[in-house]
């Protein structure tokens, strides 16, 4: 069971957490059990705990310490046995210094802490999340795929709103993508620089694999595409150019670094049309 602490006014949040008796306030026409009581024997997830009003924090702390609560307008102490999970994107230590979050509640909740980095620091998760949201909303909005260029833009975006923003963007793009494929123009986010389009935490192997997946997509029906030789050539040429730039065009030194003999290097340079003198400057 969960409750978001920013989604409702303080009085309503208090009622949702602790429940109320009939007549406790104007619209309280019948008794209502709160989330803490309903979660008895289970788990209650408090989202955005950093935005909970201080007065309500005090009441929550007392309920957690004493394992009892009173519904609004009631006098009966009700026993509860609840495991509480809390999450926030706010700096709780800074809020404590400002007097906007109770220190005792912080230490009461902070038994086990899990820090989840912002989405911009774990860009490799974005393709997996995109796939998840496409499946999640496919029944309601129609099944969609994502063009490689659109996925690059999603991976390169900084996502100040983190996963919630990503899900919102995917939902909107699914509505706009009437052809069943999400294109860059369907995304309400700006283009990204070439540097940002590659995940900052991606390894060289992951970058190469991502590009190779784009190359082989759709080839399963082909009897033969001579793909091995083609891919080796595409990787070999930039490798030779990079090493020659590093050695200032010195073929002997380049051959030593590559672990091949000089004649083999010369042959490969001719095959790929590479002029070592042009790379020596």
Image (spheres, grey):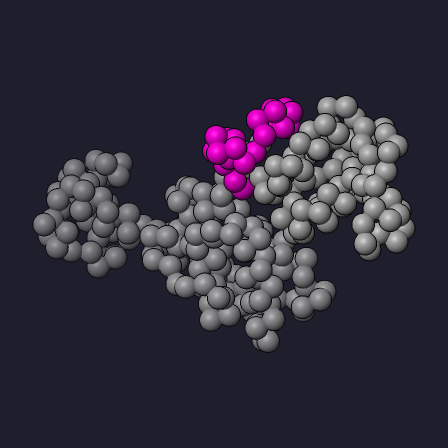
Q: Is residue 46 above or below residue 210?
A: above
Q: Position of residue 166 (x, y in %)?
A: 54, 56
Could you tell whether 253 is left or right of 133 in the image? left
Name the one closer to the observer, 276 or 184.
184
Q: Is residue 97 above or below residue 155?
A: above
Q: How many marks?
A: 0
Name the one closer to the observer, 229 or 45.
45
Which residue is pictured at 44% across the width and 60% down the height?
153
Could you tell whether 278 is left or right of 126 in the image? left
The magenta segment: 87-111
Could you tell whether 73 is left or right of 241 in the image? right
Name the one closer to the observer, 32 or 230.
32
Which residue is pictured at 72% across the width and 27% down the height?
62
Q: Position of residue 214 (x, y in %)?
A: 47, 59
Q: Is residue 1 above or below residue 99?
A: below
Q: Position of residue 84 (x, y in %)?
A: 71, 33
Can residue 183 be seen here? no
Q: Is residue 109 magenta?
A: yes
**Could you say which quadrant of the image residue 66 lies in?**
top right
Q: Is residue 207 magenta?
A: no
Name the one closer to the observer, 77 or 146.
77
Q: Position of residue 176 (x, y in %)?
A: 57, 73
Which residue is pictured at 66% across the width and 32% down the height?
58
**Could you say which quadrant of the image residue 103 lies in?**
top right
Which residue is pictured at 63% across the width and 28% down the height?
105
Can residue 54 be seen here? yes
The N terminus: image quadrant: top right
**Could you say which quadrant of the image residue 221 lies in?**
bottom right
Q: Is residue 50 above or below residue 159?
A: above
**Which residue sits furthest bottom?**
178
Could you tell whether 29 is left or right of 163 in the image? right
């Amino acid at each position: 069971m969960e409750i978001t602490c920013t989604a409702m006014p303080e009085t309503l949040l208090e009622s949702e957490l602790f429940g109320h008796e009939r007549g406790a306030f104007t619209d309280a026409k019948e008794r209502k059990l709160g989330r803490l009581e309903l979660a008895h024997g289970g788990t209650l997830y408090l989202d955005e705990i950093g935005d909970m009003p201080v007065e309500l924090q005090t009441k929550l702390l007392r309920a957690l310490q004493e394992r009892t609560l009173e519904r609004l307008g009631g006098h009966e102490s009700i026993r509860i046995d609840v495991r509480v999970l809390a999450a926030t994107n706010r700096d709780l230590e800074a809020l404590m210094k400002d007097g906007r979050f109770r220190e005792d509640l912080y230490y009461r909740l902070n038994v086990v802490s899990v820090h989840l980095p912002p989405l911009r620091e774990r860009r490799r998760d974005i393709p997996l999340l995109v796939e998840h949201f496409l499946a999640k909303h496919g029944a309601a909005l129609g099944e969609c795929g994502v063009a490689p260029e659109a996925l690059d833009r999603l991976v390169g975006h900084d996502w100040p709103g983190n996963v919630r923003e990503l899900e919102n963007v995917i939902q909107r793009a699914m509505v706009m993508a009437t052809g069943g494929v999400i294109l860059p123009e369907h995304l309400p986010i700006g283009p990204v620089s070439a540097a940002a389009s590659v995940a900052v935490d991606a390894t060289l192997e992951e970058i190469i694999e991502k590009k190779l997946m784009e190359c082989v997509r759709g080839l399963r029906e082909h009897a033969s595409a001579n793909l091995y030789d083609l891919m080796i050539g595409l990787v070999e040429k930039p490798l030779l150019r990079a090493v020659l730039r590093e050695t200032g065009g010195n073929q002997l030194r380049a051959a030593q670094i590559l672990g091949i003999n000089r004649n083999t290097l010369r042959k490969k340079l001719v095959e790929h049309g590479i002029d070592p003198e042009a790379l020596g400057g």
